Amino acid sequence: MKSLSNDQVFYAFAPDLEPHLTVDQGEEFVLNTCDCFENQLSSDEDTLDKLDWNRINPATGPVAISGVKPGNVVRIDIKKLELTGKSVMTTIPGAGMISGITEASTRVMDNDDGVLTVATEKGELQLPLKPMIGVIGLAPAEGSIPTGTPGKHGGNMDCNLIGEGASLYLQAAVEGGLFGCGDAHALMGDGEVLVCGAETPARVTLAAAVVDVPQLPTPFVETEELYAAIATAKTSDEALKMAVDNMFAFLTGIVGLSEGDAGRLMSLVGDLKFCQVVDPEITVRFEFPKAVLAQLGFAGIGV
């Protein structure tokens, strides 16, 4: 199986990147990824002063996908997501959404046997793992977008639905798409309010292919249980409205529901959630259960 090591990385999605790997559509490949700090923090004693801030949020890649043309919708399947090292978290005064953080600190955590071990002053916790990919995307048509920034191209969306078994749909803007991913988390709650989750290196097995659904509002995520429209904007109000509108467009334009039926069902069984609130722009998602649409005869995207 074709693969890239975790030193084959880039720090901005751009149309002029040279691919490190070319794969056929549907061909499985492996990307070995660093954590968001590029594995620079390895103990609780490692302070933020040790960080080279130019090496934050590396994405492994880029990967060119044969036959992908600008305008194509590309389905990226996360076949397997394996954690390959310990997890790390930092507190940074003034960063994130928690105004009460006054001290910088680093905590390295074990993530063995399906749990994240978190030491607190009141005792040790073991929390079930839910690995996910924070940075994942395709190159834009023009310009350069830092890997730490989310947007229409994907990027640092920090959506915790994007884990093993999920599929992410993105619209290609350049030949080959120029795909990359990184910033895996062993566990992260919605919002990522501290500015980080359990940052962890990983081995990610993927496959990508074009799907014939040009009207699909991207970025869009499919899991075993849910469809989710992802939206990023400078303000939460803008992002929330965009996510709602994108799910409405999916339900009416692709599923074929009437406007009234789509609106009623969105209000009855849909969920509007934050992905992250700490990056240069805000990312939210609107989730809708697949089981409801299956009852109405919807067989799936592109089916």
Image (cartoon, rainbow, N blue to C red):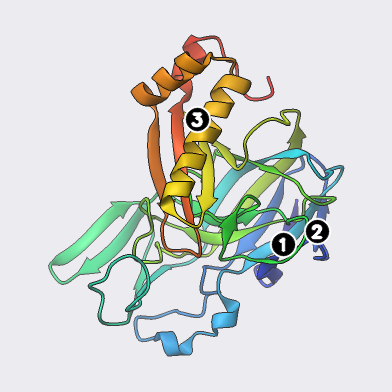
Q: Callout 2: 10 Å neighbours few (<14), some, many (20+)?
A: some
Q: Secondary structure at mark 3?
A: loop
Q: Residue at x 50, y 65 (%)?
A: 280
Residue 289 in which image quadrant: top left
Q: Which residue is mark 2?
A: 21
Q: How far from the left and from the top, in percent, is residue 303?
A: 68, 19
Q: Report the amino acid beneath label 1.
A: Gly
Residue 299 in which image quadrant: top right
Q: Which residue is mark 3?
A: 224
Q: Which residue is mark 1?
A: 61
Q: Report the amino acid beneath label 3.
A: Glu
From the viewer's perspective, tell me whether residue 40 is left or right of residue 94.
right
Q: Can the viewer see residue 182?
A: yes
Q: Residue at x 46, y 14 (%)?
A: 261
**What is the distance, in whole Å, between disc 3 and disc 1 at their CAs?**
27 Å
Sooner in the amino-acid sequence: mark 3 or mark 1? 1
Q: How far from the left and from the top, in percent, is residue 182?
A: 59, 61
* Closer to us: 8 or 197: 197
* Closer to us: 170 or 88: 170
